[in-house]
Amino acid sequence: MDGLATLLSRHSSDFHKVVPFDPVEDKLVRMDFTEANLALTEVIINDVDLFSAYVDSVLSRSGARYGIGGYGEHRTVYSRSRVFDAKEGDEPRRLHLGLDIWGIAGTRVHAPLDSVVHSLAFNDHYGDYGATIILLHVFHGIQFYSLYGHLSKADLNVT
């Protein structure tokens, strides 16, 4: 993976913006979904509408266009759903394995590099990704995937 990270860093100017972001005009806010965030109560974590309202309020209060969630974060929010539970004897998944970008509903999302659609699905389980697209990228001979979740069902062209 170190080879991929080095390659991507070296060629970062070749990427397209994933969301329309202007570093001069737009503000980002770091979203924290770990146990250190005392504002994120169990009641909020266990209610999809309250959780969405919480995210919207953090964006609004901070005046940010986008919220960013970190890679490698130990997320207590994953405990709200059985999707991330483990099989017997294994540890449940609580480690966040991606980089999240939160924006208002309807924000256009773009692939950072040329790609083909690997798969798409509507993951309709509580706490799952909802409307999801997975793209396959081949960059300088290295294959990797990017996942886009919590999209509109219309983005999947399914009903």
Image (tube, grey):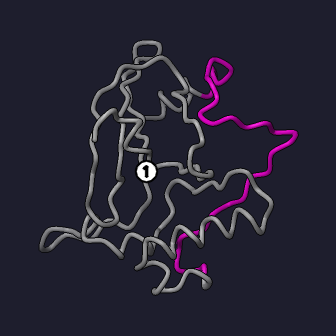
The image position of residue 3, as x and y in percent, is 48, 27
Which residue matches tag 1?
A: 150
Q: Is 21 inside the magenta-drawn segment? A: yes
Q: Depth check: give the residue in front, 60 or 75.
A: 60
Q: Which residues are magenta?
A: 9-37
State the residue at coordinates (52%, 85%). Answer: 41
- Quarter the C terminus occupies: top left
The image position of residue 101, as x and y in percent, is 58, 49
Which residue type carries mark 1?
Answer: His
Task: Work out which residue is located at the far right of the displayed protein and give it.
Answer: 24
State the residue at coordinates (64%, 29%). Answer: 17
Q: Depth check: give the residue in front, 3 or 92.
A: 92
Specify the quadrant of the image occupied by residue 119. top left
- Left or right: residue 118 versus residue 135 is left
State the residue at coordinates (28%, 46%). Answer: 122
Which secondary structure class fits the magenta region best? loop
Q: Is 91 inside the magenta-drawn segment? A: no
- Left or right: residue 48 versus residue 83 is right
- Quarter the N terminus occupies: top left
Look at the picture and state if 121 lies above or below 74.
above
Specify the quadrant of the image occupied by residue 63. bottom right
